[in-house]
Amino acid sequence: MTMKFPNSLLALLILSILSSLSVSWATSEPVTINGFLQCLPKQFHSGRPILEAVYTPQNTSFRSVLMAHIKNRRFSSPTTPKPLAIVAAKHESHVQAATIVCAKQHGLQIRIRSGGHDYEGLSYVSPVPFVVLDMFHFQSVDVNVKDESAWVESGATLGKIYYKIAEKTKVHGFPAGVCPTVGAGGHFSGGGYGNLMRKYGLSIDNIVDAKLVDANGRILDRKSMGEDIFWALRGGGGASFGVILSWKLKLVRVPEKVTVFNVTRTLEQGVTDVLYKWQFVAPVLPKDLFLRARPEIENNTEGKKTAEVSFIGHFLGQTDKLLPLMNERFPELGLRRKDCHEVSWIESVVFWDEFPLGTPTTILLNQTGTPIPFFKAKSDYVKKPIPKKVIEYMFKAMLEIGNIWTEWNPLGGRMSEISASATPYPHRAGNLYMIQYYTSWYQDEGFEATNRYIHLTRKLYEKMAPFVSRNPREAFQNYRDLDIGANLYNQSNLLTARVYGSKYFKGNFERLVRVKTVVDPHNFFKHEQSIPPI
């Protein structure tokens, strides 16, 4: 079963907010927010003033703070509902007061934001009066090389985490995403994958502890929260269960030198055949080798649009060992020595973020990243190789859309060895690879352009349906997509939740519901795709 909405959350906001809720917001806002603001300083015994961490629309910095962590311009328009306040917490007690005591007392919903990369804006947009709890001040990264661990606060970006690890050790890393501006809080709680996953699994497979503020305002660690809640946080979406303050990571071993490459082939160079063969090769390569395929639309030498595929590789070893392996397993790619670059692990992180080789690794500390586009994304899991004719259709559809790329990320290796129920993330053995569809546009603003791009993306997604996972058609929770089901209008219907829950979590959804019922029975922490209690 697939539920479709005319324009995802954007339509929800226009229909349910601008029409029916705008009057009630206008009349109730002064009372609601004033009471909330008056409540905050009464909760403290820590000597950490909270009001200095609070921004309301009357503050000159409100807009800049709100916009600084909006990573999808579809949700930055003047008509997008804004929070009544942003609490940029600086201390654990700020989180406790903002989320538990004062928000509850004054009927405000809390939306929790760490990096702002939420694809549907659910961490900073709501259809009811709400406050954003922004975790960007929680950026501590404490690396302990002796026991190969690191405590990481939820607002720390992946780039900062990688940089801090590399400051202490050249032979350790951590399996997580390749975008350095992503915040740890949402990335880890949704699963967290990257170019080390075939060797070491997901981020959640290498997390050994966490600190959580629950719906009663208690600060819990793994021991005090219990194994069920700790299980749910690692892949079930932390924002359904509380506010995650920090994570304890188990670092993984990497060589002092790794090898990276990026080889591009176009339609004119027979890339259809190469990509078809990739499906049979990439998921069964040795665990040390991760080989992403990235089909996209670019201009050819004649200035005409063409489809091309970048084959981006990450090998935990050196070129002399990589080349014979590739020539044996995947000669169709034609990898050459000059395509390969031996770099440190931290330098490979910079390479994967598409900076030129030699770029200082301090670039990973930049939290702003590239200019913010409008975008829509969707995801799929593939269990059988896609026929060549379907790949040809996909290229034609992508040429029609224009501003689109897809990412094909191979699974297998360690991912196939971990049980589907070990964490809420269920997409393990039996999957060849995952596809992300990502359509973006920078210049074309307004509903007409948005509707056009989203319609074309959905059209491609629908055409791919017979060739990807089915019953359910699986999806990756970190690539949030309201098209696959959502509890709209601030509802928490369990039957509706099962629609999207089965796609994100498969058989693990029912256990997540049971955990939610225990930890947050009154459903204080919720959003359009959260886990509801029974």
Image: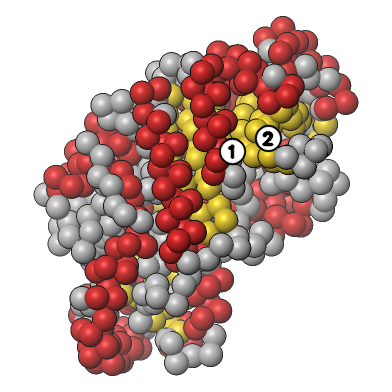
Q: Residue furthest right?
A: 338
Residue 439: percent from left, percent from top: 53, 48
**Figure label count:** 2
Picture coordinates of residue 18 (x, y %)?
A: 29, 76
At a point 59% along the width and 47% down the height, the residue shown is 403
> In which quarter of the view is residue 428 placed?
top left
Q: Position of residue 473 (x, y in %)?
A: 32, 31
Figure check: 236 above or below 89: above
Mark toward the start of the polypeptide (1 vs 2): 2
Q: Is 242 placed left or right of 147 in the picture?
A: left
Please indicate whether residue 22 sits to the left or right of residue 407 in the image: left
Question: Spatial distance from mark 1 to mark 2, Cα to Cα?
Answer: 7 Å
Q: Which amino acid does label 2 sit on?
A: Thr
Graded by Cα atoms within 10 Å as few (under 14), some (14 to 19) or many (20 or more), the crowding at tag 1 reads some
Say which residue appears at 49% left-offset and 59% top-offset: 449
| Disc ID at residue 85 | none
Q: Which residue is drawn at 28% across and 92% down?
A: 30
User: Which numbered marker is on residue 399?
Assistant: 1
Amino acid type assigned to the residue bearing label 1 in the image: Leu
Element type at marker 1?
A: helix
- Which residue is label 2 attached to? 306
Depth check: 110 or 91 in front?
A: 110
Is residue 371 left or right of 494 when viewed as pictured? right
Badge 1 vs badge 2, beta-carbon distance below 8 Å: yes
SS at mark 2 in the image: strand
- Residue 215 sits above or below residue 278 on the image: below
Q: Position of residue 308 (x, y in %)?
A: 68, 32
Q: Would you say residue 154 is visible in this rendering?
A: no
Q: How is the image coloured?
A: secondary structure
